[in-house]
Image (cartoon, rainbow, N blue to C red):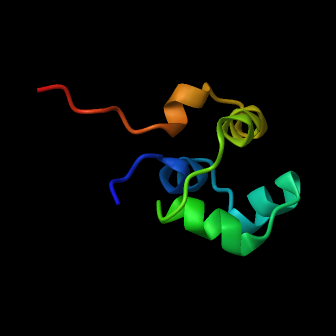
Amino acid sequence: MANLNRLKAVLAEQDKTGKWLAEQLGKSTCTVSKWCKNSVQPDLQTLERIAQLLNIDKRDLLTPSQKD
């Protein structure tokens, strides 16, 4: 699967862990790990909540699509 989100990179940039994010969202660390590995994607509502927690624009969590 293509890398659709930048969650792992943004967490690293902010010195935050997947465990911290999981606790904030009430999700399992396994779920957040899957998001960070891009094997599963968070829904849009959750993506919005993640952006709020990280104090960034939700677009900063997404990998830009390639235009040919």
Q: Is residue 9 above or below residue 44?
A: below
Residue 66: where, in percent of width, then height?
Answer: 22, 32
Q: Nearer the viewer, residue 51 or 13?
A: 51
Residue at 68% across, 63% down: 17
Q: Between residues 17 and 2, which one lies in front from this camera angle?
A: 2
Q: Quadrant of the N terminus?
A: bottom left
Q: What residue is at 71 percent from the left and 39 percent from the top?
A: 54
Residue 44, x across and y down, in percent? 65, 36
Question: Which residue lies at the image location 67% right of the left edge and 63% below the top edge?
Answer: 32
Q: Number of marks in the image?
A: 0
Q: Is residue 28 left or right of residue 44?
A: right
Q: Is residue 57 left or right of residue 6?
A: right
Residue in the foreground of this view, choosing between 35 and 13 = 35
- In this picture, is 42 found above or below 19? above
Q: Residue at x 69, y 74 (%)?
A: 30
Residue 4 % position (x, y): 42, 46
Residue 21 lies left or right of residue 3; in this view the side is right
Which residue is the extreme one toward the left? 68
Position of 3 compared to 35: left or right? left
Quadrant position of the C terminus in the picture: top left
**Residue 17 in the image: above or below residue 49:** below
Relative to the observer, which residue lies in front, 10 or 4?
4
Above or below, comparing residue 4 to residue 26 in the picture: above
Where in the figure is residue 19, as x and y percent of width and height?
A: 75, 68
